Image (cartoon, rainbow, N blue to C red):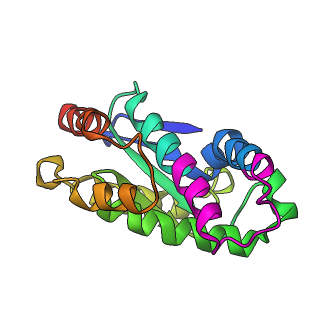
Amino acid sequence: MAINMTVKNISLIYLNDLFYRVIQNHIYDDLKEYNLLDKPLTNKDVKKIYYHHMIHNIIEAFLDYKQEGKPILIFCNTYMPPCDLIGYYTDEDLLDFIERFIDKLEKMLPIRIVVTSYELKESLGKEIQIEMLINACLIKSQDISAKNYTFEKIKSFAKQYQLSYLNNDYLNKIRTKQILI
């Protein structure tokens, strides 16, 4: 789900929805294929699969983004849509893992992320919650300059978790996209 707010020059990409519609399916399929569904989120192989699909799909969402305004990733840390992974991990475990991951991701890539306790779909009818979310997004949209990123942290992270698709060409696409917006 994406919400375009051209008046404010921002557009919101809802991570919880992206996770539900796209990411969790890939994660589930890979965990099942490699017989890792019974392993905890702290298992290194499980982390590799989560990191691979989360980074890849988040970056692709930014690269494929065609709306006007600066894209901002919104993550609700209190709501996880029902998904196949819930049978293996609790909502709290998944939300905590994703929140810790996006905290790392924000330090490694020039993407804007806002964490909120408000579930976006429910907040759309509540003016105060939306206003607080928009203000947080506006602050975040002015907070990042793509030219300050060297991608050394993501390269080190990619090497540690064997995320070979995160090569220089792929990272340059991110830099180019961020400069254009």
Residue in view at x 73 percent, y 42 percent: 25
Q: Is residue 30 visible?
A: yes
Q: Is residue 51 above or below residue 61?
A: below
Q: Is residue 113 above or below residue 97?
A: above
Q: Is residue 131 above or below residue 93?
A: above
Q: Quadrant of residue 105?
A: bottom left
Q: Is residue 82 visible?
A: no
Q: Is residue 56 magenta?
A: no
Task: Kindly give the residue lying farthest to the right in the view shown.
Answer: 87
Residue in view at x 50 percent, y 72 percent: 100
**Residue nearest the observer in this picture, 148 or 130:** 148
Residue in view at x 32 percent, y 43 percent: 8
Q: Looking at the picture, how far across and down is residue 160, in whole percent?
A: 40, 63
Q: Which residues are magenta?
A: 31-53
Q: Looking at the picture, how far across and down is residue 178, in whole percent?
A: 24, 39
Residue in view at x 54 percent, y 59 percent: 75
Using residue 137 as the reference point, say whether residue 153 is left or right of it: left
Task: Kindly give the residue lying farthest to the top in the view shown.
Answer: 66
Q: Looking at the picture, how far across and down is residue 120, in whole percent?
A: 61, 54
Q: Is residue 35 above or below residue 171?
A: below
| Number of numbered discs on residues | 0
| Image quarter in which the C terminus is found | top left
Q: Looking at the picture, how far across and down is residue 176, in whole percent?
A: 21, 33
Using residue 153 as the reference point, say whether residue 91 is left or right of it: right
Using residue 109 as the reference point, say whether residue 52 is left or right of it: right
| Image quarter in which the N terminus is found | top right
